[in-house]
Amino acid sequence: MIPQKLRLKNFLSYQQLALDFSGLHVACICGGNGSGKSSLLEAMSWAIWGASRVASEDDVIHVGSKEAQVDFTFMAGGEVYRVMRTRSRNSSTSLEFQVMSEGKFKSLTERKVRSTQQTIVSHLKMDYETFINSVYLRQGRADEFMLKRPSDRKQILADMLALSQYDELAERAKDIARTSKAESIVLENMLVHLRAQILAGEAISPQLTALQSQLTELQGWESRDLDRLQVAEKLQKQYESHLQQLTWLQQQQAGLTSNLMQTDRQLLSQCKQIQQLEATLSQRSQILQDRDRYQLLATQTAELECKFQTYQHLSDRRVEFSHKLTGLQTELKAQLRHYQAQLEALVQQERDLQGILGRAPEIEVAIAQLNLARSVLQEFDRLHGQSTPLIHRHQVLQHQLEREQTKLTAKLEELVAKREQLYLQVQHHDRLLIAAQELDRQIVLLQKKQVYQQRVHEKGLERRDFLERLKIRLADGEAAFNKLEAKMRQLTVPNAPCPLCDRPLDEAHWQLVQKKHKKESRDLQADIWVVKEQQAASECEIQVLREEYRNLMKEIAPLNDLIQRKGNLQERLKAIAEAQQRLELIDAEIAELRDRLQTNNYSREAWEEMELIDRNIRKFAYDEKNHALARGDVERWRWAEVKQSELKNAQRQAENLALKIPDLQTKIKQLHDRLEKNLIDLEVQHELEQCDRALVQLAYDPDIHHQLRSQKQELTPALLQYQELARAEQEYPELQQQVQQLQQLHNVHQQELEIMTNQIAQLQTQCQSLQGDHAEEIRSLRQNCQDWRSQMDGLLSQIGSLQQSQQQLEQNRQRERETLTRIELARHRQRIHTELHQAFGKNGIQALMLENVLPQIEVEANQILAQLSDRQLNVRFITQKSGKKNDRLIETLDIEIADTKGTRPYETYSGGEAFRINFAVRLALSRVLAQRKGSTLQTLIIDEGFGSQDRLGCDRLVSAINAIAPDFECILVITHMPQMKEAFNTLIEVSKGDEGSTIQLVG
């Protein structure tokens, strides 16, 4: 990976940045601590792999911004790539991946971010772990490779050397070996099946003879039942014809009987109606007399109804005026009571006011005392007004100091709690590190099983597709075989024509055609048998693959959970590393806060101002207690003002009462006079008298009116009787004519019924002569014939199958020999590919390649380390060590470090020595891998770490960097040390201001 262009927007400390790496070979990125030097390289790794030092995704966004974006262009494997990663706050991440093609960028972005990330890694051929352990010497993580477990070191080297291709070859060899083993198992199962078929074929001849004898017997039984069935069907046909005629005549007989009964009912009903009409006609004179009397009563009743309406109207009017007069009288009495109540209330109010007016001297004395108390209070108010601002300011300052003290105390408690949390968090570092390493091992193992599971799935799909093609081929073969069998059955008929041209066949041609068809039949049977064997083998192989797939599915089920747990552990380990740095800062801050609280060393200006205010308040002779007593005196005499106001109101009210009381007395006297003389409303009283005179003149008697209504109601049925008389005079001739017609129809139906009864008796005699219904016998005979035919078809099928089995017996013996040969070939192929799987595995070619490259890395590391330590330090890589049992060697990758005093553990070396060792190993690793053909390591990034070196150590580091510069396209060194800046010709100076970090290219 060779960087070309980097554009940042709101990423960490940068708001806007555009940096072009074109023409840069060895450059130094310099600036103060916290200026944003490492953020440039963090932007590259975040853009490509989405990984950075922050704990949360949103932490990469610049403070106060909503979105961060990194646009990084780089070269890898001869191609120019562009990655654009964007993160929105509290939202998701978007990723765009492009490649330069014909002068333009072409998109390689997948549908999902995870898929696009995998595409980037596959093109770059380097994951994030390999990057930080080879290309990128991160700040504070220079010992990343040294502190890895031996297995992890070997995996990093394997990824750099592209040894994964041998893993693929090993898996392919393993798949072929597994397939060969499955094939041999399938062939062995086929062999067992063939031998069972051969053994079963020896018992075919006796079975065939027995089946043919059973067939002849069944044909005789079928012929006998067919003859009986013909006779029964003939008798049944005659019986059903007579039975159908009999049923029709019985239905006609029932209809005539029903019509005859209905005619009798109608005749009886009409005779009754004639009798009723004759009775009505005999009462004709009485009905007419009652009708005339009813009409006279109706006329008299109508005249009284007119008088009743007038009487009702006058009565309602009289009641209305009477009610109105009563209401006016009630209103006058209520008004009189109201005036009397008002007069009593005014008299009582006048007596109450006299009591208030009698206290006038006492109220005047109290007013004088109130004025004296107010003058004393005004003096206290003046003193209070002068001292109040100072008191208020004193309280404000006191509250301010209390808030500051509370704030410092809360901050101290928060820091102490945070320190405790960080201590607890740091204590779990070793345990979490061991757990993370164990998870890495499990995840790698399950990911390999996942790849193998996918291959098993693809193999199963291929086998199922092959099985479907076999089914189609088998169906076509069986159809052709059935067609050929039908032609052969035609040849068995005497004088059968040719199945192809329909011409007569002589004996020679008949033999020729039959021989040809038998040969084609054997070929088709052989082809069908081969297809069935292939089907059985494919189904068995699919079962093996399906079982293996299910087992692999169960094994890799925990993979996603392990990956999630690994991510959580890595985040926790990062948080622990940052917690260790924060602990030192927190301890210092806690000590400072405790000192300030104990010495009151905070808000000094507020303390001084409060002391000055205390001195000024004491100058005033203001006593708050006396001030309160003065307020109490004023409040004690304040009732005098209220009573003085009440006294004035009482005087005004007494004057008003002296005017209102005589007026009310006059109104009460006038109302008494009107009620005594009955002078309420003259107009209403006049209308009431007129209504009384009109009622006398009308002379309406309700009793007479009611008597006429009763007589009229009694004669109401006379109208209905008159209507019945008119209807009877009209219907009587018509009914007499209908009765005559019904008598004639009854005679005709009686004659037809007698004829039909004779015909039914004759048909019943004929049905008895045919011995009843034969349907049950016919069904039984037909079922017997069907059973004979079904049994004969089964026997014919078994006979044909046995005949085919005889022909296949010899073919099965031949296939048995061929299957034995194929089993030997499959076992041989399995042995070969098992050996290839071991050769391509971790302990085979890959281990040899690592053993070949490790000496080169060791030589390079010692050359660089000799230059850095003046030949005082030396490293050695160990690839094998003795196990617990001395007769067994274990593959490993340990690193031994020695100085002039001998070999000792890595942890015992000083910080400067450890950094030189790490630097030498990392540079040697990158240099050797960069020199290998086809390697993608063309960039080296060194982030800080020079602080542990003295002047001479720094010079030696710069010399080592310049020595390996020709092997890399780009080397970036990050430092804040001035003496390191002077050693480089090209500088990228980083500074930080109010608007974020900015850069300047120098040289």
Image: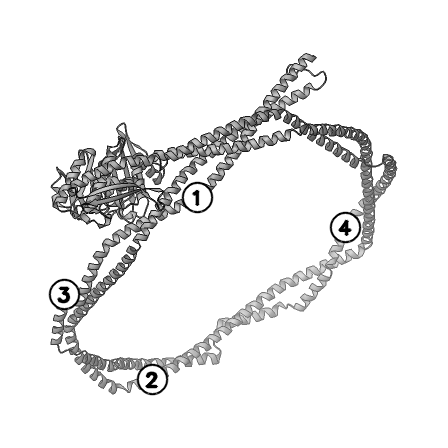
How much space separates mark 2 and mark 1, taking CA atoms?
106 Å
Left or right, 825 with respect to 23, comes to right
The residue where tag 1 is placed is 555
Mark 4, mark 2: which one is toward the viewer?
Answer: 2
Check if mark 3's residue and mark 4's residue have beta carbons within 8 Å: no
Mark 3, mark 4: which one is toward the viewer?
Answer: 3
At mark 1, the secondary structure is helix
Mark 2, mark 3: which one is toward the viewer?
Answer: 3
Three-letter residue code for mark 2: Asp
The residue where tag 2 is placed is 352
At mark 3, the secondary structure is helix
Left or right, 924 with respect to 481, comes to left
Dividing the picture into quadrants, the one containing residue 217 is: top right
Mark 1, mark 3: which one is toward the viewer?
Answer: 1
At mark 2, the secondary structure is helix
In the rendered structure, which disc, 2 or 3, sits on the residue that comes first in sequence? Answer: 2
Three-letter residue code for mark 4: Ala
Coloring applied to the structure: one colour
Badge 3 local density, few (<14 within 10 Å), some, or many (20+)?
few
What residue is shown at x 32% (from left), y 46% (from top)? 91
What residue is shown at x 18% (from left), y 36% (from top)? 964
